[in-house]
């Protein structure tokens, strides 16, 4: 009788361990499907150079393109980080690189991530607050400046308490939700 109770307890313990392992494995699969990670070395290299958290850049890439290097938008943004060619060439002028890019060059992951990081670095120099930077990455620097100067949207001219564009509000929310997962990778 004691032996049967002992065996039942072990069977339950093994079953609980199996279910736990199955759930953990399912969670990892869910995370990897919804939060893919490619180009880690390129991300880390550019984040080190432009003083950015890799988890933020990985989150931006996932939200912008779902890690599709050939992604394009109806607003002429291209590649992993959805950079416009005009933005990349503006950054080249701003940072005095002497480079003029072509659209095909901007589709390359190394180049696209570099210019996406360069743009985030540029925006951090202008805005400081992460959510304000993300709003600017999505809606544009000029639009965000107008929001910061409007007391309906900002009380301190640094952070946005209210974002009038639903797309931008949702964009920031998606990036911040992604950050939770990408912080586990980096």
Image (cartoon, grey):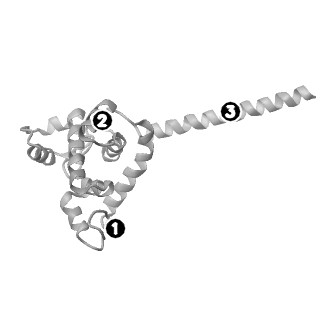
Q: In this view, does 26 lie to the left or right of 19?
A: left
Instruction: State left or right for residue 95 relative to residue 48.
Output: left
Q: Can residue 74 be seen in this view?
A: no
Give the alpha-carbon distance from disc 1 to disc 2, as whole Å. 31 Å
> Which residue is label 3 attached to?
17
Give percent across and percent down for residue 152: 30, 73
Q: Quadrant where the C terminus lies?
A: top left
Mark 1 or mark 2: which comes first in sequence?
2
Identify the residue at image location x=25%, y=67%. Answer: 147
In contact (CB < 8 Å): disc 1 and disc 2 = no
Which residue matches tag 2? 43
Dot 2 falls on a residue whose secondary structure is helix
Residue name at image x 27 percent, y 33 percent: 45
Q: Is residue 53 left or right of residue 121?
A: right
Percent position of residue 57, x then y: 32, 42
Q: Which residue is drawn at 34% across and 45% down?
A: 56
Quadrant position of residue 59: top left
């Amino acid at each position: 009788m004691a032996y049967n109770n002992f065996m039942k307890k072990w069977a339950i313990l093994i079953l609980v361990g199996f279910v736990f392992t199955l759930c953990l494995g399912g969670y990892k699969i869910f995370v990897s499907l919804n939060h893919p990670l490619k180009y880690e070395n390129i991300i880390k290299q550019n984040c080190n150079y432009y003083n950015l958290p890799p988890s933020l850049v990985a989150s931006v890439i996932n939200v912008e393109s779902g890690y599709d290097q050939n992604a394009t938008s109806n607003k002429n943004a291209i590649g992993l980080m959805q950079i416009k060619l005009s933005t990349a060439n503006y950054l080249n002028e701003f940072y005095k690189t002497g480079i003029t890019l072509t659209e095909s060059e901007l589709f390359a992951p190394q180049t696209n991530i570099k210019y996406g990081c360069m743009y985030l670095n540029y925006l951090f120099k202008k805005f400081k607050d992460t959510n304000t930077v993300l709003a600017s990455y999505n809606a544009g620097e000029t639009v965000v400046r107008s929001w910061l100067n409007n007391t309906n949207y900002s009380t301190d001219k640094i952070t946005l308490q209210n974002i009038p564009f639903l797309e931008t509000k949702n964009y920031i929310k998606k990036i911040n939700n992604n950050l939770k997962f990408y912080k586990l990778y980096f």
